DNA sequence: GGTCACCGTGTTATCGTCAACATGCGAGAA
DNA sequence: TTCTCGCATGTTGACGATAACACGGTGACC
């Protein structure tokens, strides 16, 4: 910075003003400084700036696992949104509940300005630290005053899926739910129950989001079940295999609807009818909410409505 | 730090020595300092340390897309390995070739100590910056003196897959390759050609790694083709659908082998025979190689041999 | 007897940047 | 004229940590 200042014939403070876009710089001076920066290949030193300002322009992403396609998609959306807004993104993974507290500590040590939490939040919520100085946005979580919320309206998506299946006239709609303790799984299950209306729904089957768990769980589906709403696409993949192995055709014998609309779902057999989450919008909204919180605002919880994508499986 | 020093009755320098694990500290003094740190809840300020030392203890990951399951798995492996070694990880995405240079600039501005590149490297290699001060490790790339290399032996995996198919006595083995310009795709194609031996192989089909592209490409497979090696599992998913739509049974009519062994592959229909990449080992190796380069070493290129996982599709 | 390396700790200078205050100047008001 | 004000710019002093050096005493070695 001193070299740039010398080359432009100004003080370091003026270079700082140019770098930070202060309006109180004469256009000619600004041009001279910019020319000097370009010719010297000057790049600002983030650590020095962070030391002086107390901000790092870095946000953290705490994610439980990247094994689910949904989390991967969210990570990409968050990374892109953060980059556009001038923030760097540092990623930490936290498998298991006690790892969450440790992950927060690592992020805090890192000096991030705020963090986005992508987790099975009803479990993780307990480990969320007190407000402290860390701005937080949690994706898919019950409302909590300590942090910002961004989520898909899982229940609405589940109602749409269940209603679509019910309209097929296949009798009761079965549900293969996500793991206990997951907010998203609980909401999707709630939507399914609500759509069942007065009719008592059949017992719920349960998996852990993985295709393998879907395969196992769907094996418990009774022979007379003719409509199945699966809480995510990957479990639906496993369920499709289980049905096929038992000689049951989809959609003729059993209609199946998934959730997420992962990229592969259109190439399942048959192509999967599913509920599409807009991961890009969700990721961008999470970053926006976090940036607002870092700036001292506390925007309202944002809820995005998913849409049903009808393909061949139902 | 000054508060800790005052509470422990020592100088700031001694606190620094305790924090950095210097051996030249009297055990009693060390204990006093640690007690002071604990009671004051002291946490080191990374930006200040980075300013003084010139190191950030942060590594970057430059990734083209997280839409492929392989990249997601690698990201997770790298994140975990970095965390274990005391490095933070910042992620930048770079879609398209010109974005790569920009992504490097962003990483450099961030002040990372080094970076791992996860990309279709033959294209990205052109954009890789001169050695400069940024240590680099590129995953799946042709040898280049400017950076470290870590890779799977794609050709060996492809040879194993092709040999397995050939041993089935289905005649010539067809290949659905990855996109042009991808190092991994080229290597897998090379392995397939080598395994064909003296027999001239059939023309290659080509996709872009996505299931949708696999579906399209497999439509061009001639009716008499009875063995197919697909360059990744997701394209194999699309190919399985295309074959099914044409009434061809797998494995009875056509035997299919994939590559990667993503988690879902065991739940494809039929469960996919595929070549397993050890993403965790690859990610850990990439971080190790990068840390070594940051430390001034230049370890040799590391090549991991994948293994064939035989399931029902071949 | 002299040189040297080491012990555990303190003192000082420094890393690159930016906020606060200071300064000199010219335009307009009194 | 003189005073006041706002503008563009300069000067100074942190921000929190650590590297380099200093300290006086001691044992190993030539």
Image (cartoon, coloured by chain):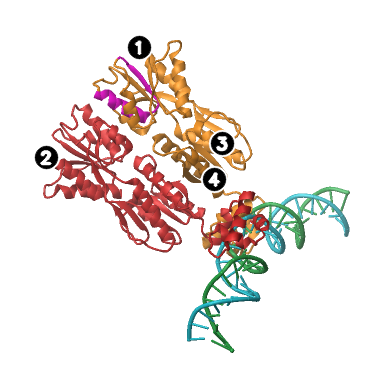
Chain colours: A orange, B red, C green, D cyan
What's the distance in space between the residues labelled 2 and 1, CA to CA? 48 Å
State which chain disc 2 sits on: B
From the viewer's perspective, is the residue at label 4 or at label 1 nearer?
A: 4
Tell me whether the residue at label 4 lies in contact with that at label 1, contact meaning CB atoms closer than 8 angstroms: no
Position of residue A64 relative to residue B28, above or below, is above
Q: Is residue A230 magenta?
A: yes
What's the distance in space between the residues labelled 2 and 4, CA to CA? 59 Å
Q: Is residue A27 visible?
A: no
Toward the viewer: C30 or B117?
B117
Label 2 element class: loop
Q: Quadrant of the C terminus of chain A?
A: top left
Query: Mark 1 — residue?
Result: A169
Q: Residue at x 61, y 62 (%)?
A: B14
Label 1 element class: loop
Percent coordinates x, y for residue B272 in the rendering: 25, 36
Toward the viewer: A312 or A172?
A172
Query: Mark 2 — residue?
Result: B171
Q: Residues within 10 Å of mark 3 (few under 14, many from 20)?
A: many
Give the magenta-colored segment's residue range. A224-245
Q: Residue at x 51, y 56 (%)?
A: B56
Task: Give the numbered dot on residue A289.
Answer: 3
Task: Give the numbered dot on residue A105.
Answer: 4
- Image side of residue B270 versus residue B139, left or right: left
State which chain disc 1 sits on: A
Q: Residues within 10 Å of mark 2 (few under 14, many from 20)?
A: few
What's the distance in space between the residues labelled 4 and 1, CA to CA? 52 Å
What's the distance in space between the residues labelled 2 and 3, CA to CA? 59 Å
């Amino acid at each position: 910075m001193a070299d740039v200042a010398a080359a432009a014939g100004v003080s370091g403070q003026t270079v700082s003003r140019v770098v930070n876009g202060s309006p109180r710089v004469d256009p000619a001076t600004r041009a001279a400084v910019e020319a000097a920066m370009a010719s010297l290949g000057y790049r600002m030193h983030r650590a020095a700036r962070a030391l002086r300002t107390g901000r790092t322009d870095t946000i953290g992403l705490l994610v439980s696992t990247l094994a689910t396609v949904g989390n991967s998609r969210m990570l990409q959306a968050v990374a892109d949104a953060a980059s556009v807004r001038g923030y760097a993104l540092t990623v930490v993974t936290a498998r298991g509940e006690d790892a969450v507290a440790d992950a927060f500590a690592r992020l805090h040590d890192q000096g991030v300005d705020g963090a986005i939490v992508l987790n099975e939040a009803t479990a993780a919520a307990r480990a969320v630290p007190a407000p402290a100085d860390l701005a937080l946005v949690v994706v898919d979580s019950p409302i909590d005053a300590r942090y910002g919320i961004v989520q898909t309206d899982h229940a609405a998506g589940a109602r749409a899926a269940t209603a679509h299946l019910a309209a097929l006239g296949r009798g009761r709609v079965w549900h293969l739910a996500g793991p206990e303790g997951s907010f998203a799984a609980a909401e999707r299950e709630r939507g399914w129950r609500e759509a069942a209306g007065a009719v008592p729904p059949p017992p719920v089957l349960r998996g852990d989001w993985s295709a393998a768990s879907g395969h196992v769980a769907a094996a418990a589906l009774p022979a007379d079940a003719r409509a199945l709403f699966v809480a995510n696409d990957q479990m639906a993949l496993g369920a499709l295999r289980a049905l096929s192995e038992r000689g049951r055709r989809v959609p003729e014998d059993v209609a199946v609807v998934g959730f997420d609309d992962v990229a592969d779902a259109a190439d399942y057999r048959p192509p999967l009818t599913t509920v599409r989450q807009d991961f890009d919008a969700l990721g961008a909204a999470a970053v926006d909410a976090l940036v607002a919180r870092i700036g001292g605002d506390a925007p309202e919880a944002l809820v995005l409505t998913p849409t049903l994508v009808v393909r061949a499986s139902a």
